[in-house]
Image (spheres, rainbow, N blue to C red):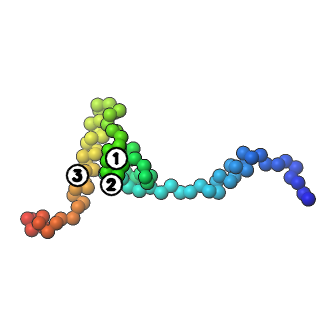
């Protein structure tokens, strides 16, 4: 039976096998800030998970960064409020 002159090391074999099973990462959208986030993880942009604040993102920022972040979060909230469809009462008032 033929035997290779130089065998493959475990590392070499493992590296080739690893790339066979790499899968695409699927991202969902954070409901609060609308940024892409891996599923079942905390959003690193706003610090929310399942509607609750888990991480205080603004705590470690400087004053200037904190202002910019708050402004950005307010703009996103305004956009989400505008996207909601009008109810019958709101339609009758207009």
Task: Report the disc number at residue 78.
Answer: 3
Q: Are marks 2 and 1 in contact (CB under 8 Å)?
A: yes
Could you tell whether 35 is left or right of 77 in the image? Answer: right
Measuring from the top left, give residue 4's x and y in whole percent. 86, 52
Task: State the residue in front, 1 or 70.
Answer: 1
The residues tagged by marks 2 and 1 sit, at their Cα atoms, a distance apart of: 9 Å
Which residue, given by chain and number where applicable, does mark 1 sit on? Answer: 48
Which residue, given by chain and number where applicable, does mark 2 sit on? Answer: 31
Query: Looking at the image, which residue is at 24% across and 46% down?
Result: 74
For residue 37, say whether it is visible.
yes
The first of marks 2 and 3 along the sequence is: 2
Query: Looking at the image, which residue is at 27% across and 50% down?
Result: 76
- Is 86 placed above or below 25 here? below
- Is 45 placed above or below 30 here? above
For residue 46, say whether it is visible.
no
Task: Report the disc number at residue 89.
Answer: none
Measuring from the top left, give residue 15's x and y in whole percent. 68, 49
Q: Quadrant of the N terminus?
A: bottom right
- Is 79 placed above or below 64 here? below
- The mark lying in front, picked from 2 and 1, is 1
The residues tagged by marks 1 and 3 sit, at their Cα atoms, a distance apart of: 18 Å
The first of marks 1 and 3 along the sequence is: 1
Could you tell whether 16 is left or right of 80 in the image? Answer: right
SS type, badge 2? loop
- The mark lying in front, picked from 1 and 3, is 1
The first of marks 2 and 1 along the sequence is: 2
The quarter of the displayed image where residue 81 is located: bottom left
The quarter of the displayed image where residue 73 is located: top left
Dot 1: within a 10 Å radius of its alpha carbon, few (fewer than 14), some, or many (20 or more) residues? many
Dot 3: within a 10 Å radius of its alpha carbon, few (fewer than 14), some, or many (20 or more) residues? few
């Amino acid at each position: 039976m033929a035997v290779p002159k130089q065998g493959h090391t475990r590392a070499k074999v493992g590296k080739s096998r690893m790339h066979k099973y790499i899968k695409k990462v699927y991202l969902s959208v954070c409901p609060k800030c609308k940024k892409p986030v891996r599923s079942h993880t905390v959003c690193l942009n706003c610090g929310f998970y399942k509607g609750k604040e888990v991480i205080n993102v603004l705590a470690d920022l400087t004053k200037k960064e904190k202002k910019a972040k708050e402004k950005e979060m307010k703009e996103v909230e305004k956009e989400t409020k505008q996207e909601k469809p009008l109810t019958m009462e709101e339609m009758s008032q207009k």
